[in-house]
C-alpha cells in the first residue's frame, strides 16, 4: 500500500492558512503575556529576548507569502517596534495582510520549487511550512522564558 | 479568488510523513546532545527534563497513527526508559513502526473527524499535525535547556 499514499491529499491551502493564523493567534498571546520590559530584555542561556524572536516571525511571514506568490523575494521593510503595543500593531497588520494575500497565491506556486531569499531551495508550500514550524519552535523558547519569570504561558492547544 | 483556495491541495500523506520523520530526526539529535544526567534531571523554570518531554512524543506518535488508522485510541504501553540509550532505542523502534504503519492509514481517515483518546475531536490529519506541532514546540524548550547548559543545539533547519 505504501506507494499509494503519494496520491492522498491531506491539506488544502485554505486549511494551511487557517492553521497558520491559529498559531499566530497563540504567538500573539505569548507576546501579550510578557511584561513590557521583559519582552525586550529578558532571556535565558544568552538567547534573544522574545521581542526579537517575534520580529523574526514578522520578517518572515508576509515576505514569504509575497515571495511564494510572485517569485520576488524582498526583505521586510518596516520600523523595528520598540514597545509592546507597536509590536502588537505590526502583528495585527500582518494578520490582515496574510488573510488578504495568501488566497491569491497562484495554485501552481505551492508545488513549484523556488530559491527563497536566494538561500532556501524548496517548493512554495515547504517554505510556508518552514515559517510556521520556525514560529512554533521559537515560541516554545518564549514559553520557557515565561516559566522562568514565574508567568503561566497560554495553553498550547488553544488557537481560537 | 479567496473561495477557490479551498480546492487547492498542498500536501500529500506521503510528504506529511516525510516532514514528520525529518522533525523526528532533529529531535533525536536534541536527545543525543544532552549529557545523560542532564537529559533526565536538568530543566529551567520548573519545567520537565527533556527525557520526559521525549517520552511524551513517544506516547503520542505511534498511538496516534494507530488511532487515526483504526479508530481505536490506546495508550502507549511500554517501559519508561531510564537511560539515554534505552530512550534512543525506543525512538528508533518508533521510527521504523511509523514508516510501516503510516502508509496503511485508510485515505478517508485523514479527513474523518474522530475523538482522539476520547478527548480531542479533530480530523485525522489535524490530530497528526498536532503531534508534530507539539514535538516542535517542546523541542524548542529543549533548545533553551541546551543553551542554558552551554551546549550548542543542532541546527533547526537540518532535517536529514
Image (cartoon, coloured by chain):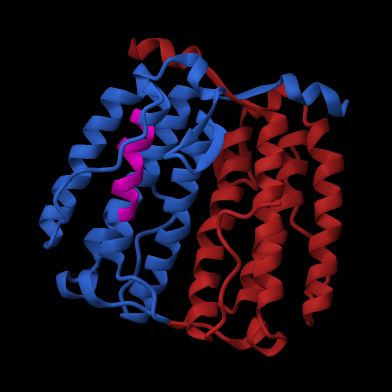
Chain colours: A red, B blue
Q: Is residue B101 left or right of residue B45?
A: left
What x and y, as percent, mark residue A100?
87, 41
* The magenta stretch spans residue B108: no
The N terminus of chain A is located in which quarter?
top left
| Residue A5 lies in quadrant | top left
How many badges with numbers are in the image? 0
Pick the residue in front: B77 or A138. Answer: B77
Q: Residue at 83%, 76% (x, y): give it.
A: A85
Q: Residue at x 30, y 70 (%)?
A: B49
**Residue B19: which quarter of the image?**
top left
x, y percent for residue B8 = 70, 21
Residue A78 appears in the picture as rendered:
no
**Magenta segment, which residues?**
B56-66
B139 up-or-down from A13: above or below: below
Residue B59 forms part of the magenta stretch: yes
Q: Nearer the viewer, residue A32 or B156?
A: A32
Left or right: residue A114 versus residue A45 is right
Q: Identify the residue at horizontal 85%, vertical 29% (top origin).
A: B2
Camera-nearest residue between B107 and A65: B107
A119 relative to A40 in the view: left or right: left
Amino acid at each position: 500500500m505504501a506507494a499509494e499514499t503519494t496520491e492522498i491529499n491531506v491539506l488544502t491551502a485554505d486549511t494551511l492558512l487557517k492553521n497558520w493564523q491559529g498559531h499566530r493567534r497563540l504567538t500573539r498571546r505569548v507576546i501579550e503575556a510578557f511584561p513590557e520590559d521583559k519582552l525586550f530584555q529578558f532571556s535565558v542561556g544568552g538567547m534573544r529576548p522574545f521581542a526579537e524572536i517575534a520580529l523574526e516571525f514578522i520578517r518572515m511571514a508576509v515576505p514569504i507569502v509575497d515571495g511564494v506568490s510572485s517569485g520576488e523575494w524582498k526583505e521586510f521593510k518596516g520600523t523595528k517596534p520598540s514597545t509592546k503595543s507597536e509590536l502588537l500593531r505590526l502583528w495585527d497588520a500582518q494578520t490582515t495582510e496574510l488573510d488578504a494575500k495568501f488566497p491569491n497565491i497562484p495554485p501552481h506556486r505551492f508545488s513549484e520549487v523556488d530559491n527563497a531569499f536566494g538561500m532556501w531551495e524548496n517548493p512554495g508550500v515547504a517554505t510556508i511550512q518552514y515559517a510556521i514550524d520556525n514560529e512554533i519552535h521559537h515560541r516554545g523558547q518564549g514559553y520557557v522564558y515565561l516559566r522562568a519569570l514565574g508567568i503561566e504561558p497560554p495553553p498550547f492547544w488553544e488557537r481560537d
